[in-house]
Image (tube, rainbow, N blue to C red):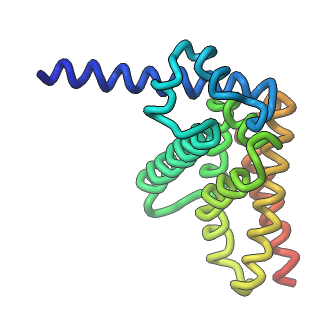
Amino acid sequence: MKMKSNKIDRRVKYTRMVIKESLINLLEKKDISQITIKEICENADVNRSTFYSHYTDQYDLLRKIEDEFLDNIKDYLSELEQKNKNEVNPVLLAEKIFDYIKANAKLCKLLLSERGGLNFQKRVMTLVYDTIINELTDNSKITKEDAEYVYSFTITGCVGIVQKWLNDDMKKSARYMAEMVIKLTLGVINLLKR
């Protein structure tokens, strides 16, 4: 009996995977508003009823892809924080995030592009940067209000840096990018401490 249940789980996972890949491939060519359920199904080689048993529409599918991506980053960050409970090195943390982005470059490039939308960009950077900004501001003497300005400025800047890095085919190493982001953030913090 259990074997049958595992087969169904594998089939469901496979179906969801091909539907997601279908949307991602279509997003490389056009905006979500121009993508039809019919195209997604044809590309994934599934019928419409199968699609609708998992998703309400193409926007729901995109949201679920975004949520899954964010959950994976959260898990990744939690794992890193567990390993380094005593000391979180902001550069190492940022480097690991750049490694994760590089490993998922195709999806990241799409989700962080104009096709992914500004809301998703902010969600990613807020999630990623919460840990880093806390580390950077804990030992500095800037006010919480100033820290929030640094945070907003840095999140927007990080989105731009990641987009440029992805568009440049990630020529610079994850370590180089991490050091750049942390140096820029520390530079802003140091300017405010004067």
* Residue 42 at x, y percent in the picture: 61, 15
Report the number of numbered marks.
Answer: 0
Q: Residue at x 77, y 26 (%)?
A: 28
Q: Residue at x 83, y 47 (%)?
A: 161
Q: Work out whether residue 96 can be spotted.
A: no
| On screen, residue 12 above or below 154 | above
* Residue 133 at x, y percent in the picture: 67, 67
Q: Quadrant of the C terminus?
A: bottom right
Q: Residue at x 73, y 51 (%)?
A: 121
Judge by depth and name the residue closer to the eye, 6 or 178: 6
| On screen, residue 183 above or below 70 | below
> Along the horizontal axis of the image, is 87 left or right of 21?
left
**Image quadrant in which you'd find residue 59:** top right
> Along the horizontal axis of the image, is 1 left or right of 75?
left
* Residue 3 at x, y percent in the picture: 18, 19
Residue at the far left in the pictured view: 1
Residue at the far front in the pictured view: 49
Judge by depth and name the residue closer to the eye, 148 or 121: 121
Q: Quadrant of the N terminus?
A: top left
